[in-house]
Structure formats: structure tokens, C-alpha cells
Amino acid sequence: MNKVLLIGSDGMLGGDLAEILAEKYDVTTTTIETLDICDKEAVINKVKEVQPYFIINCAAYTNVDSCEVNYDLAKKINGDALSNIVEAAKIVNATIIHISTDYVFQGNLDLDKVYREDMESVPVSAYGKTKLIGEKNVQKYDKYYILRTAWLYGIRGKNFVKTMLRLSKEKEEISVVSDQHGSPTSTIALCRIIEQIMEKEPKYGIYHATCEGYTSWYEFTKKIFEEAGIETKVKPITSAEYKEIYPTSSNRPKNSMLSKEKLQKIGIYPEEYEEALKKYLKEELKR
Ligand SMILES: NC(=O)c1ccc[n+]([C@@H]2O[C@H](COP(=O)([O-])OP(=O)(O)OC[C@H]3O[C@@H](n4cnc5c(N)ncnc54)[C@H](OP(=O)(O)O)[C@@H]3O)[C@@H](O)[C@H]2O)c1
């Protein structure tokens, strides 16, 4: 049974991944309380102690708006700390699986464009910039998988679906951005992709890892309400109108559409976002 060190297991993705991988792997988990990835010595000591085959990093500074005002801290966690993980991985020859984001792309509104892994990264937000620094640090090592995901939601933690469900109870009409496009991705669907990467061990590199299908936040909200039998009205607004309401919010990519062709070529077929949403709502609405 391969040993896995799963960093960031208290997070939305890390929590689900810890449960799923425990069925097949000898998993050691760490949280921010037990391992701060910014502490190089602690990271090295943990990796030497566990001797993992895979190191999976789900830890990150994920509050996109707050990255704009706390850039230095975000850079430390999302960017610089990856050098610590790389240094530790080298000592035990472990393979790194690191989770990154669609925010590394500029994301101009050009819906004919679907981002491939090899396309130029020009982040427009502090979060995206710090995550790109992290990617570059991971790429200084040769044994890595960088999985770029997007629009993630899961049972643990705050997410878009939960927010819409809550707002539907508080308001008669909700305004939702209609000019940002991407693939909503459930943590469980992403865990299944990660599991398959671990099983297949394809060529090292960057892989786009979201659910299949593209939508806008506005259309996605309508889908959530349709599935949940909610009748609250949904009004489309532009990103510019949203920014007028929330002036300190970070710039977000308008096009977050990531091509999954590279995953498909290695025989990994992500779930359609509508299917993943249905499964998620079944769990969420029971709670
Ligand atoms: N959520 C999305 O929509 C989305 C989209 C694209 C990519 N991603 C990426 O997917 C990954 C997982 O995201 P998520 O939504 O599961 O994030 P999350 O719920 O915020 O989990 C991240 C975890 O990392 C921990 N952490 C923060 N600083 C740390 C440090 N210095 N050392 C160790 N742990 C630390 C956090 O602890 P605290 O909570 O105590 O700070 C939290 O438990 C991240 O790499 C993220 O960038 C997420």
C-alpha cells in the first residue's frame, strides 16, 4: 500500500480526499494546526518521518478577495511554500500532486477559447499571481502533477452552491454574474480525477481537472434552483455591475473554460457538471 502525505486535510477538498483515499492508501494527513507549509524545517521533518510515495498539497490561501490586501501572506502560502514541499519531496523521491487554479489565466471574454495546459498564464488577480508562483516552484522538480481546477464546491466549507441556497431563503430575487464562464466542479468529482492520476501515473506535468461542460454563474444558479425545486428569481448582471456593488472584490477571469483533452487522452473522463451537482445536492439538502 503506497504511503500518502495529504497536506491541508481540513479544507473543502482535502477533507473529502482524505476520506476517499483512506480506502486504498496508507494516508497521513496534516492540517494548518499540525503542519504549516511555510515552515520549511517542519515540512522536511514530516516528509522524512512519513516517507510518502505521493505528497498531495490541498493547502492554500483561498480567499480570493483577501489575497488582494494580504498579498505577502498569500504569496508565502500559495507561492513560496511550494519550494519547501519540493525540497522535502526531493529527499524521499516522492511525487507531488499540487492543486492549482483557472485563475492563472487572464480569462478575457472570448468564448471561442478553451484554455489548454500549455497556453500562456497571465493572472489578473493577486490570488492567481500567487498560485502561478506556486506552480513555477513545483515545476523546479521533475516528479509532479499540477492539477488546475475551477469553481470548486463541496460539503465542507463555504462555496457558491451553499451561498445560493442560503440567499434563496433570504431574498425574492438574486443577482448573479452572467459574463463569467467555467465548469463548476464538485470536490468528489475532483477526488475521482486525483485517484485516477494516482493509479495511472501518467506523464508528469500540468493537467486541467474540472468537471465537463461549461456554464455561467447565472445559468449555474438557475440549474441549482431547478434541481433543488427553488422558485427564487435569478437576475443576470455583468461583472462590472457586480464590482459596483462590491468595489473591493478581486478581478475574476471571464473565461475559465479549461480543456480536458489532455486528461481524456490518458483515459480520464471527468463527470458532467450537471451530474456532479445532482449528487452534491442530494447530500447537501439532507443536512
Ligand atoms: N475553492 C475553489 O473554488 C478553488 C478553485 C480552484 C482551485 N482551488 C484550489 O484547490 C485547492 C483546495 O481548495 P479548497 O477550496 O479546498 O481550500 P480550503 O477549503 O480553503 O482549504 C485550504 C486549507 O489550507 C489550510 N491552510 C492555509 N494556510 C496554510 C498553511 N500555511 N499551512 C497549512 N495549511 C494551510 C487552510 O486552513 P485555514 O482554513 O485554517 O486557513 C485550509 O484548511 C487549493 O489549492 C485551491 O487554491 C480552489
Image (spheres, rainbow, N blue to C red):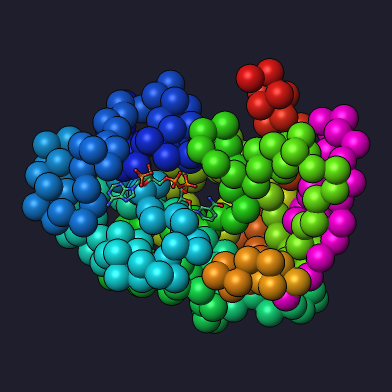
* Residue 105: quarter of image: bottom right
Magenta part of the protein: which range? Answer: 213-240
Relative placement, left or right, of 181 versus 95 is right
Relative placement, left or right, of 203 versus 268 is left
Q: Inspect this view and state whether residue 24 appears.
A: no
Q: Inspect this view and state whether residue 174 appears.
A: yes
* Of residues 66 and 98, the one drawn nearer to the viewer in this rendering: 66
* Of residues 203 and 118, the one drawn nearer to the viewer in this rendering: 118
Q: Quadrant of the N terminus?
A: top left
* Of residues 163 and 254, the one drawn nearer to the viewer in this rendering: 163
For residue 131: magenta? no
* Residue 46: quarter of image: top left
Q: Report the residue at 31% width, 29% height from top.
A: 27
Relative placement, left or right, of 22 versus 178 is left
User: At which x and y percent is residue 131?
Assistant: 42, 66
Q: Report the residue at 80% width, 76% height from top.
A: 112
Q: Residue furthest top?
A: 286
Relative to 149, does residue 168 appear above or below in the rendering?
Answer: above
* Residue 251: quarter of image: bottom right
User: At which x and y percent is residue 147?
Assistant: 49, 55
User: At which x and y percent is residue 284?
Assistant: 66, 26
* Of residues 182 and 156, the one drawn nearer to the viewer in this rendering: 156
User: At which x and y percent is residue 99?
Assistant: 44, 54
Q: Report the residue at 65% width, 47% height from top.
A: 160
For residue 238: magenta? yes
